[in-house]
Image (cartoon, coloured by chain):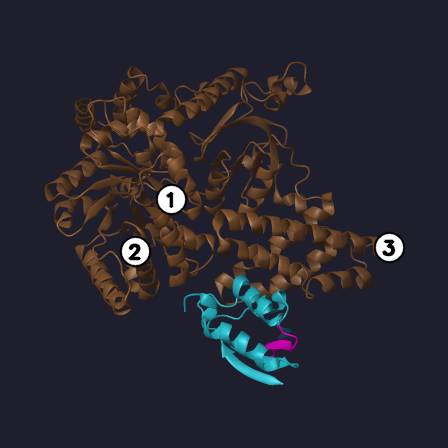
Chain colours: A cyan, B brown
Amino acid sequence: MVVREVTVTNRAGLHTRPASMIVRTASKFDADFFIQKDSYEINGKSIIGVMTLAAEQGATLTLTFEGEDEDEAAEAVADLFEEGFGEVK
Amino acid sequence: MLPKENNVQISEGSPERDVAFDRVGNERVVEGIGVAPGIAIGPVYLYARAAFEVEERHISRKERDAEIKRFEDAVSNSERDLKKIASVAREKLGEGSASIFDAQALMLRDEAFFDAVIERIRNDRMSADYGVQTVINKHRQLLKASESEYLRERANDMLDLQDRIVRHLRRGKILSDVDSKTIVVAESLTAADIVLFSRRGILGTVLDYGGATSHVSIMARALSLPAVVSTHGVTSEVATGDTMILDGLDGRVIINPTEETLQFYRDRKERYHRLQEEQKQLVPLPAETLDGHGIRLTANLEFQEELKLIEEYGAKGVGLFRTEILFLMQRRISLSEAEQFDTYRRIVQSVGPDTTTFRVLDFGGDKMLPMGHREHNPFLGWRGIRILLDKPELLYPQVRAIVRASAYGPVRILLPMVTEIGELRAFKQILREVYGDLEADGETVDPEIPVGIMVEVPAVAIKAARFAREADFFSIGTNDLTQYTLAVDRGNDLVASKYQELDPAILQLIKSTVDAARAEGIPVSVCGELAARPLATPILLGLGVDELSASPVYLPEIKRVIRAIRMEEAVDLARRSLDAGDAHEVTAILRVWLKEHACDVATMLEGDGRDVPGSA
């Protein structure tokens, strides 16, 4: 199991487009993927789940990956957060 | 002649004929904003959200499997729609606009939606409609609880999805009861709706809300679908089947027209078609007066898919590329330098060897940044260059992208909402820094990109002589110049009639701007709506403007006027207009000239209402 802490850096937060980028990226891997915000946990391969996190700029999220390709999956998803989904910070 | 179907409401012997006669005297003329030219005459299809309201309904055990099947079919159909819409959006508007529809498609098969609805149908015996609504409501509540206004608004994306599925559940196929050859009347439509309606062959659309630069208006223009927006409550005055005339040229809608009005508009429509045919012959001809004085006609563009219109209507370059529309279309606060560069480079390559004028981001006013801030008086607030100088993270990537694009063809940079000379200087400093960075990166670019300013705040027109020493060109934005000079908000019905671009005060400001530019030898263009009005062409010509930039579709008509006038006549008309008492006197002077000089089609397009029987 791989656990990563990430921060939402883009100004608009996890709205529709970033959410769909996360889901599309995570779905390329077999590893199970969950996102936790405060005490709320959702399936990271569900776009509605990701959107209903309502994660705003500055929010800290815990990403959990479990499966054979968990390292690669964690790397790919964490990169999206680092790049702020290609949006303004 | 009109296609036969258009006449169905008033044809001999049809039952509707009696209805039409009952309503003689009930003819109503409603003014709005024409956002896509053309005239449509036909029956109304009233498209109201209320039609998709969902009732709480439960089903019996034996209906259960059929109901699940019905839901699955609706999801498949919605998925197919979304793919179609995404592909049209991708083709017409680019990748970013398509992504929202891709995301909706992803939601359809999401376990939190798909599996959840099936569970409601199976376990709680909800009808499919009710199940969809229940599940979506739950998710919407979570989004609405967010602190961020932007995320709260995403709850509407979910509502769109619900409407889409419910429409399929109700009628099998989306919008299937919208007949072709109808005028769709709605409070508002999404760009996606307009694509689907257009594919069903509707005649045009009338919307209570929206403006010339709304997403849906731009889409209507791209699809050549006549459209009038901002009609304030027409939806509550019409019913499906009522006869309507939509005049996208004048921004006017006529409900239950009399036979006389119908005849007038049938003629007008035919004249418009004839005019369009004639205009094709004007495209290759030069824009010069009878005595050989030339003026440059350029295009106002909003997105790269409009580029084909430049050639189609004979524009000599792009006089105004409104970059903010790219951002608004994609519902994004920012686009990366790479994304912007890619778009700008394609435009420059396509427009070359003619020049492309990029106006840097003009957010603020009625073009809200999706950042959720509110201002008491946005038109006098944080707008245009004021935002950009406060937010270098928006300005730098854009300037870099534009400068890099200059390697592919001639480019100019235009600054919006300048009021003080310091703003121009601050921008030039940033431009120098960008040049330095790019030189360090070894990029070859145009080292002397002209930097001009919009003349849209009266202060700038008054100080034009001073600005002309430091700016490389002027572009007069008559829309804002008019509202700031006359202190009239044209969106405000109480005073909208006082919004007169031809007020002598505006003409005086244009004159001082042109004179100041002349003295310093810099060019002046006009890029507001006034530039698109054939009626105003003689004055702008006579005042000495070098370039008119307008939506390409209007250029042949302007060229017709230019080719019919002598420079001394234009100068004389301008002089008399400056001396007129008010905009109505100016209009009268110009109309007389246009009528006398066989520019009757131009006069027809101007249509100030006096010729329309219904509006008397």
The residue type indicated by label 2 comes to Ala
The one nearer the camera, B138 or B593, is B593
Given the image, on which type of amino acid does mark 1 rest? Leu
Q: Amino acid at mark 3?
A: Ser
Q: On the picture, is B513 further left or further right than B68?
A: left
- Which span of residues is magenta-colored? A29-41
Front-lying residue, B557 or B405: B405
Q: Quadrant of the C terminus of chain B?
A: top left
Q: Position of residue B64 (x, y in %)?
A: 84, 56
Residue for badge 1: B301
Judged by its main secondary structure, the magenta piece is strand
Disc 1 chain ID: B
Local packing at callout 3 (Cα closer than 10 Å; few below 14, some 14-19, many 20+) is: few
Give coordinates of residue B146: x percent, y percent.
54, 67
Check whether the beta carbons of the residues at disc 3 and disc 2 lie within 8 A of each other. no
Residue B606: name its quadrant: top left
Q: Residue at x 55, y 66 (%)?
A: A21
Relative depth, front residue between B438 and B525: B438
Q: The disc numbered 3 marks a residue on which chain?
A: B
Query: Farthest residue toward the right?
Result: B62
- Closer to the camera: disc 1 or disc 3? 1
| Chain at tag 2 | B
Q: CA distance from mark 1 to mark 3?
A: 57 Å
Q: Does residue B248 appear in this view? A: yes
Question: Which label sits in the foreground, 3 or 2?
Answer: 2
Q: Which mark is residue B407?
A: 2
Whether residue B371 sits left or right of residue A75 in the image: it is left
Which sits earlier in the primary sequence, circle 2 or circle 1?
Answer: 1
**Label 3 sits on residue:** B60
